[in-house]
Image: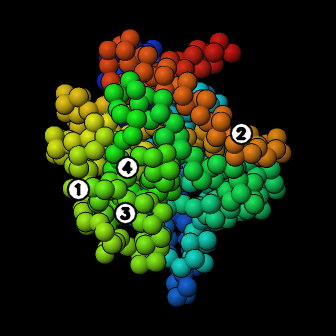
Amino acid sequence: MNPFKQALEQLERTIAVSPVSDELRRRLIRPERELTVSIPVAMDNGTTRLFEGYRIQHSSLRGPYKGGIRFHPDANTDEVRALAFWMTLKCAVTNIPMGGGKGGITVDPKKLSKAELEKLSRGWVRALYPILGPERDVPAPDVNTTPEIMLWMSDEYAKLTGDTRNATFTGKPLANGGSEGRGVATGMGGFYVFEALRKSLKLPERVSVVIQGMGNVGGNAAKIFHEHGHNILAMSDSRGGVYSPSGLDPEEVERYKKESGNLKGFPGAKQISNEKLLELSCDVLIPAALENQITKKNAKNIKAKVVLELANGPTTTEADDVLFKKGVAVVPDILANAGGVVVSTYEWEQNLKGEHWSEADVLKRLHVLLDRESKNVLEISKKLKTDLRRAAFALALKRLEKALQSQSRQ
Ligand code: NAD
C-alpha cells in the first residue's frame, strides 16, 4: 500500500464533495521539491556506511515548509512524500502560517551506537542545510527522532550557517530553546480534539481507550486520558501489547517496559498482538504508531465506536468506507494529531522573538485553537453530509485556495 497514493485518493474524494480550482489540485498532487541524499557515516568499527536521507518540501503556499524527520528501516520516498502532503493539509486545517514538508533516513536507529546516531543526524543536516532555515523549512521530530537528535541537528545547522537564532529545528530540549508543552503536545492535542467532539460523537463522559504505540504520541496520550479518568484497556509497542479489561496504569506499563525492555510478563494483564489489539471492543481506538494499520482486511472487525488517528495515515481509504458504513467515526490524523505541529510552530515563534512562554500559556493557546478548528470541521461535515476526513480536508483546501489566490494577485 503506497501511502502517497492513499493521500491522493483522500484528496480526490474530498474534491468530489467540495471542489477546488484545477490549479490548486495540480499544485498539491506533486511536491514542490524532493531531495534524496547519501550520508556517509564513519562507524565505530572503522568502516564507512552510506545512509539514504530525504527531505520533501510539498507546499509553501501558506508559509515555510514544516514537518518532522523519521528514522526508520522502512522510510522511503513514497512514505515521506505522503507525510509531507499531510503536513500541508494539517498546517492549513489548524490555520498556522506554515507549509508542509517531511524528512527521513532509512535506518534502524536501534542498531547504531549513540556516537553513530549523532554523526548520522549531523550528516543529514550537512547534506540538506542549504534548503533549510526559519524562513524556508523548519523540521521537527517524528518516529524515532528525539529532542536530543533535534539538538544535534540544530547545533550542526548553527555551525554551518552562523544562524544562532535556534529557529530552524523544533522539538529541541527545554534547556536548548525547546518549548514548554512540546513533549506532550501531540497527545494533548488529540485529547483536546476528543473533548471538543465527544458529545457530537455520542461518547459517554468516561470512555474506554485502546492505544497502539507507546512512544512520544501514544505514551503521552495514554497518560493524559488516564489522568482525566478514562479507562486504558490496552497499550502496545512494536512487539505487541498488554490488555486488561479492568484498566492499565500507563505510568506502570512504561516503567515496566523501561526496566524489562519490552511488555512481556507485565503483571495483571493479558498479552495481545498488535493485530488483535486493534479489534478490541472499546469506545475510542487510538492508532499511534505507523501507517496502514486499519485496512480493508481488518476494518470489518473493528469494534471501537470512534477511531482517533494520532498516527499519520493509519487508516486506508478502503477501510474508511467500511468504517463509515459500520457507523464508526474516524477523527482524521490531520486534525487529531495536529497538536505537535502547532506547538512546534509556537516554539519557532518563541525562538524568533527571543521569548519563553509558560506551559499553561502554550497549552491554553493549543486548546483554544483545536477546540475551534474541531468544531469548524464538525460543522463542515454536517453541511457537506460527509465524514470528518473529507470535512477536515475541505477546510484545509479552502485555506490553501485562499493562499493561492492571494499569491496569484502579486
Ligand atoms: P515514537 O518513535 O516516539 O514511537 C513510536 C511507537 O510506535 C513506539 O512505541 C513503537 O514501539 C511503536 N511501533 C512501531 N512500529 C509498530 C508496529 N508495527 N506496531 C505497533 N507499534 C509500533 O514515534 P511518535 O513520535 O510517537 O510517532 C507515532 C506516530 O505519530 C507516527 O505516525 C508519527 O508520524 C505520528 N505523529 C507524531 C508527532 C510527534 O509530535 N512526534 C506528531 C504528529 C504525528
Q: Which mark is residue 231?
A: 4
| Callout 3–callout 2 Cβ contact below 8 Å | no
Residue under numbered circle 3: 237
Residue at image location 43% in from the left, 16% down from the top: 379
Proximity of marks 2 and 4: CB atoms separated by less than 8 Å: no
Disc 2 target residue: 361
What is the crowding at mark 1: few (fewer than 14 residues within 10 Å), some, or many (at least 20)? some
Q: Amino acid at mark 2?
A: Asp
Above or below, comparing residue 357 to residue 268 in the picture = above
* Lower position in the chain sequence, tag 3 or tag 1: 3
Q: Quadrant of residue 118?
A: bottom right
The percent coordinates of residue 56 (x first, y second) are: 51, 45
Q: Quadrant of ligand 1?
A: bottom left
Kindly identify which numbered label has been placed on residue 352: none
Between label 3 and label 2, give the one nearer the viewer. 2
Residue pointed to by mark 1: 275
Q: In screen coordinates, is 306 left or right of 77?
A: left
Q: Is mark 1 within 8 Å of ligand 1?
A: no
Q: CA distance from mark 2 to mark 1?
A: 39 Å
In primary-sequence order, the first of circles 3 and 4 is 4
> Which of the 4 image quarters holds residue 330?
top left
The Cα–Cα distance between marks 4 and 1, rounded to whole angstroms, is 20 Å
As drawn, 169 above or below 106 = above
Give the class, few, some or many, for how many residues have Cα within 10 Å of label 4's Cα (few <14, many ≥20).
many
Can residue 133 be seen from the camera position used here? Answer: no
Q: CA distance from mark 3 to mark 2?
A: 32 Å
Using residue 308 as the reference point, say whether residue 296 is left or right of it.
Answer: left
